[in-house]
Amino acid sequence: MAAKLVAENKPFQSMFYPEKNHGIFGGKTRLHLYQLMTEFILNNL
């Protein structure tokens, strides 16, 4: 998907979490993700 967004010159952000697949369980992963989501909303509304 990222390659297609770049090819279409579309802005995007992505975050990868080591040793995680489709779940964000364990440690502070969920807190980190929600903080990033909140920051994105506040900066882009």
Image (cartoon, grey):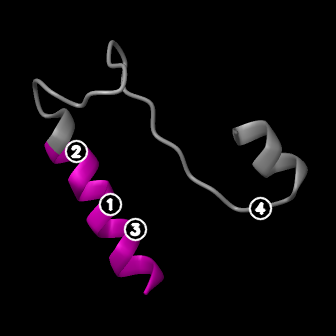
The quarter of the displayed image where residue 26 is located:
top left
- Residue marked by disc 2: 32
Quarter holding the N terminus is top right
Q: Position of residue 40 (x, y in %)?
A: 40, 68
Amino acid of disc 4: Lys
Relative to 8, is 25 above or below? above
The quarter of the displayed image where residue 37 is located:
bottom left
Q: Position of residue 16 (x, y in %)?
A: 44, 30
Highlighted range, magenta: 31-45
Give yes or no for residue 43 being in the magenta stretch. Answer: yes
Amino acid of disc 2: His
- Residue marked by disc 1: 37
Label 1, label 2: how far apart the Cα atoms are: 9 Å
Give the foreground label among 2 and 4: 4
- Residue marked by disc 3: 40
Dot placed on the residue nearer the N-terminal end, 4 or 3: 4
